[in-house]
Image (cartoon, rainbow, N blue to C red):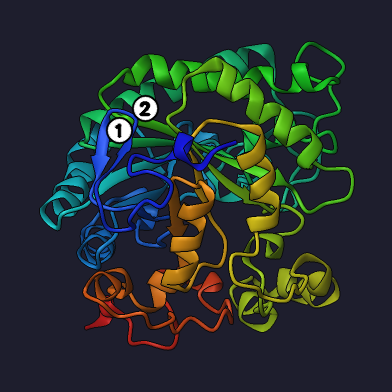
Amino acid sequence: MSKERHTDHGSEPAVFEPARLGPITLKNRIIKSATFEGATPKGQVGDDLVAFHRRMAGGGVGMTTVAYLAVSPEGRTDRHCVLLGDDVVPDLRRVTDAVHEAGAAASAQVGHAGPVANARSNRSPSLAPTRRLGPSGAMTRAATDGDIARITEEYRRGAALAVEAGFDCIEIHLGHNYLLSAFLSPKLNRRTDGWGGSLANRSRFPLQVVEAVKGAVGDRAAVTAKLNMADGVDGGFWLEESLEFGRMLEAQGALDALELTGGSSLSNPMFLFRGEAPRVEFAATLPGPLRAGFRLVGSRFLQEYPFEEAYFLPYARQFLDALSLPLILLGGVNRLDTVEAALDEGFSFVAMARALLREPDLVRRWEEGSTDEGLCIHCNKCMPTIYTGTRCVLVPDPAAG
């Protein structure tokens, strides 16, 4: 595959030149990827969420992604997750207005948490492809045909509401063993009906959702998806199938780009994060009985993987070779030369997260001529802060200032 198929500027696109993403144009090729902001207590959008994304937009990214907007009540990660409905559109418009005023585009990550959802917090049974024990200790409910039809419609409606709220891009969550990712997983999807078994069957629900979102959005916004290349779990979704599913998405023609990720929020989240495992800090966020249990299983749940710059690149190159669909590289990017090299290889955009929690203005400094490596040390102590306001613990909390 040639590099030119992914770029607008020849074989070596400039990081800080405008770039097309479907029907929209970003001012550069760096995207702030979705990280749950911990800034929506009781699911309410307020000043903290606006300020979070204003900082990211003002820091120089081409687009910042709001995470995580649930399409269904039981699809919230917990009760502090925003549920897309008519009532939140005006408040989400405050976020997109602030982002636009700061010179960036705004993306809405929409999804259904499925088996990852906290049923006790949501006061509603969590859904999964097949019945299993959920993270809150309650059993999930196997999604029925009616649930699948309802949730597909809720994705369609949620995407339309996000566009009404001023978002320039809709990102569909197909990763981390959330509901659509769980349907793709041969480990989590043990169904024997038309939604399970073969990859073609396991792909039906995700592909149906992507089609519904595109139908709702049309050319009013870009449509992207965040896809697991690998779950990082024995028996889970892995490259052989994720590449084939990528080909299905490309053939469908509904996506403007594909962001490549990995890991399971149910079983192996550190496959996504890499670096130090913040077991002590994570345990401190749990209620007493769960904290005691976590001491026994914490090292298995939060495994430790050595950090390497752009650690998903070897997997992502497989997609670069197989697809002509524009691709977004994600995973441990701290350096400008890493961004440049990824674009030179043929990736259309590069997504960053933890480095921008540490230094929201890093991209702007790069554009002004700095070549400094980001200061993020991959301690991952930002992970447990999602319950109190996501931030780097090595800098003062901007919300407290």
Q: Write down the quadrant of residue 370 in the picture.
A: bottom left
**Residue pictured at 71% horizontal, 34% vertical:** 243
Residue at the outermost left position: 101
Look at 69% across and 28% down and name the residue there: 245
Label 2 amino acid?
Ala
Q: Residue 159, labelled with which disc?
A: 2
Left or right position of 140 against 212: right
- Element marked by disc 2: helix
Distance between mark 2 and mark 1 Cα atoms: 5 Å
- The secondary structure type at the circle numbered 1 is helix
Q: Quadrant of residue 275?
A: bottom right
Seen at 63% across and 57% down, the residue is 313
Kind of residue at badge 1: Ala
Above or below — where is 224 with respect to 196? Answer: below
Please tell me which residue lies in front, 68 or 365.
Answer: 365
Query: Height in image: 175 above or below 246?
Result: below
Q: Residue at x 77, y 41 (%)?
A: 239
- Residue 312 position within the rendered picture, expressed as x and y whole percent measured from the top left: 65, 58
The image quadrant where one finds the N terminus is: top right
Check whether the beta carbons of the residues at disc 2 and disc 1 lie within 8 A of each other.
Answer: yes
Q: Position of residue 227 (x, y in %)?
A: 60, 40
Badge 1 density bin: few <14, some 14–19, many ≥20, Cα 10 Å:
many
At which x and y percent is residue 49?
A: 28, 59
User: Can residue 125 be seen in this snapshot?
Assistant: no
Residue 162 - label: 1
Q: Quadrant of the C terminus?
A: bottom left
Give the image location of residue 57, x and y in percent.
24, 60
The vertical placement of 194 against 185, above or below, is above
- From where the camera sits, is residue 180 visible? yes
